[in-house]
Image (tube, coloured by chain):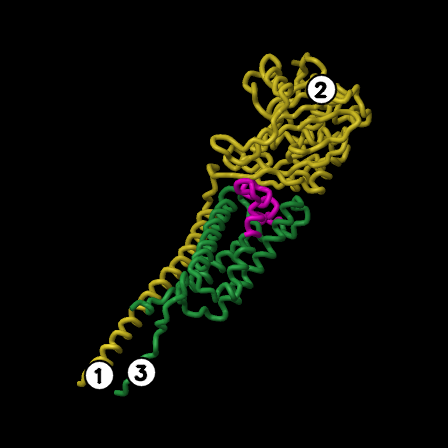
Chain colours: A green, B yellow
């Protein structure tokens, strides 16, 4: 049986404050950035509608589908801040964190911040979805689009985080 | 086996162990990540199934919002209910009309003053605002009306409504002060404060939102309405549940249809409030105060 030489493992010590990472696949920065930009656009639209009184909402009112009811409900603000604006800020921050350069960064803080942010966003989405179903009794299609994007972003970031976790081979 | 070969084998075994450990760690991380995503999907499915199975329910959750600007369409629909509709409704299905009091005239700028004290969280205020706003629109023009909903954790949760916070009525016949004491955002055991009534207005409420002017059961209640020091009312003229599940636009649009139960209640209450205001304006404008719907509702006004 022919022996094969084992491939070398990266044994370079990390930069100070940095964690050695496996490179993320190309599709990760692309897809996450696309999701963030889509979220940014929709959240921007919802924010605009919030501050203009939801006068031009492109959203049907069929059965339980009712964007105005949701976006003018008592759940449309959190601690005095419009949820739509929170969404805009959220996707704005995530857009920066999902730039290709940010994905290439080995800084643990940035990775933790990205993962923490998408997790927090996911929890908020679950809360708001619950509120739509059980308290407001209406579904906002634009909000649902935001929810789907948030879950998609969480999926991308969480799985990428798992796949590109820190290598331990630099240990002596 | 030479020492060199032994050391090579040992190195290969070490590399293999490291790789296996690395693979295990990676697998564990992926399993955790995929499980988290799967749990989210399952949780969403459970929520949807629970909702479809009829699990709605009462409100105990945190809430939070102040008003946004009412849309131009809503403001217009409230302010331009066809006179024929209002005449057809008359007193409608509204109850709890304003009651006459004997008090000093309430005036501002030489005009009778209408004072409203309520709160954005309050479901009865949510119901009554529609009638108050519509009645006052017959004497002037609204700017800055808000659009909000009652508290999600009170009875008749999230009743769609307007807000008088920051609203202005431009009128040659009456002046208006709308006080919304809180938002619908919970804060501690109550709600976040919003407007503070002037001390004189708070004193008016203490005096006239109580027996003998109003039934003891409604003492201190909101919404409180003082119409020129001539009529007062406390509470709503119809049940907020009539508006359940409706948006501001749906409610506003319903006001023009005299057969709609919302129009029967809101237009009827608006006619009664209009009749009370007319008593303070010497029945001006005549086109409003002499309208059959207003005169019909005037017969329901309380006599204190």
Which numbered tag is attached to residue A5? 3
Question: Which badge, 2 or 1, comes first in the chain's sequence?
Answer: 1
Q: Is residue B143 above or below residue A89?
A: above
Pick whichever, A14 or A117, lies toward us. A14
The answer, for residue B239, to whether it is visible in the render is no
Range of magenta residues: A61-89
**Secondary structure beneath disc 2?**
loop
**Secondary structure beneath disc 3?**
loop
Quarter of the image that includes the C terminus of chain B: top right
Which numbered tag is attached to residue B228? 2
Which residue is tagged 1?
B4
User: How far across and how far down the image is residue A162, in percent?
Assistant: 39, 63
Mark in front: 1 vs 3: 1
Is B98 on the left or on the right of B123, as rendered?
right
Is B296 on the left or on the right of B163, as rendered?
right
Q: Chain letter of disc 2?
A: B
Pick whichever, B47 or B53, lies toward us. B47
| Cα distance in 3D space between marks 1 and 3 | 15 Å
Asked whether the residues under marks 1 and 3 belong to the same chain, the reply is no
User: How far across and how far down the image is residue B54, in percent?
Assistant: 46, 44
Q: Chain letter of disc 1?
A: B
Give the residue drawn at x 37%, y 71%: A12
**Secondary structure beneath disc 1?**
helix
Q: Is residue B263 above or below residue A132?
A: above
Give the residue drawn at x 74%, y 27%: B293
Mark in front: 2 vs 1: 1
């Amino acid at each position: 049986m022919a022996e094969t030489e084992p491939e070398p493992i990266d044994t370079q010590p990390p930069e100070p404050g940095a964690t050695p990472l496996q490179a993320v696949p190309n599709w990760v920065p692309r897809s996450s950035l696309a999701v963030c930009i889509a979220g940014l656009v929709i959240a921007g639209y919802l924010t605009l509608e919030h501050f203009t009184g939801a006068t031009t909402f492109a959203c049907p009112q069929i059965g339980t589908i009712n964007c105005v009811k949701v976006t003018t409900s008592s759940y449309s603000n959190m601690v005095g801040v419009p949820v739509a604006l929170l969404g805009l800020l959220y996707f704005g921050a995530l857009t920066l964190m999902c730039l290709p350069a940010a994905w290439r960064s080995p800084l643990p803080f940035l990775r933790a911040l990205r993962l923490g942010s998408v997790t927090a966003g996911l929890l908020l989405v679950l809360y708001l979805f619950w509120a739509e179903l059980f308290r407001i009794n209406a579904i906002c299609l634009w909000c649902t689009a935001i929810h789907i994007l948030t879950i998609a972003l969480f999926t991308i970031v969480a799985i990428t985080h798992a796949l590109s976790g820190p290598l331990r081979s630099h240990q002596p | 086996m030479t020492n060199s070969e032994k050391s090579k084998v040992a190195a290969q075994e070490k590399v293999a162990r490291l790789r296996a450990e690395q693979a295990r760690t990676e697998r564990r991380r992926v399993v955790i990540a995929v499980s988290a995503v799967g749990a989210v999907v399952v949780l969403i499915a459970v929520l949807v199934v629970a909702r479809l199975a009829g699990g709605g329910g009462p409100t105990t959750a945190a809430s939070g919002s102040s008003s946004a600007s009412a849309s131009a369409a809503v403001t217009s629909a409230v302010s331009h209910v066809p006179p024929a509709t209002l005449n057809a409704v008359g007193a409608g299905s509204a109850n709890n009309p304003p009651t006459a009091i004997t008090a000093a005239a309430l005036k501002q700028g030489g005009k009778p003053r209408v004072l409203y004290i309520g709160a954005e969280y309050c479901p009865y205020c949510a119901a009554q605002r529609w009638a108050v706003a519509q009645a006052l629109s017959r004497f002037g023009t609204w700017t800055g009306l808000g659009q909000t909903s009652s508290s999600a954790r009170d009875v008749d949760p999230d009743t769609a409504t307007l807000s008088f916070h920051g609203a202005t009525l431009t009128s040659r016949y009456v002046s208006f002060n709308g006080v919304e004491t809180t938002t619908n955002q919970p804060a501690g055991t109550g709600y976040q404060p919003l407007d503070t009534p002037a001390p004189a207005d708070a004193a008016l409420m203490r005096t006239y939102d109580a027996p003998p002017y109003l039934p003891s059961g409604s003492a201190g209640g909101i919404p409180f309405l003082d119409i020129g020091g001539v009529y007062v009312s406390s509470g709503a003229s119809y049940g907020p549940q009539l508006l359940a599940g409706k948006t501001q636009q749906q409610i506003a649009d319903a006001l023009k249809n005299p057969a709609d139960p919302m129009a029967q209640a809101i237009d009827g209450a608006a006619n009664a409030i209009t009749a009370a205001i007319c008593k303070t304006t010497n029945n001006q404008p005549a086109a409003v105060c002499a309208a059959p719907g207003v005169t019909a509702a005037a017969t329901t006004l309380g006599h204190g």
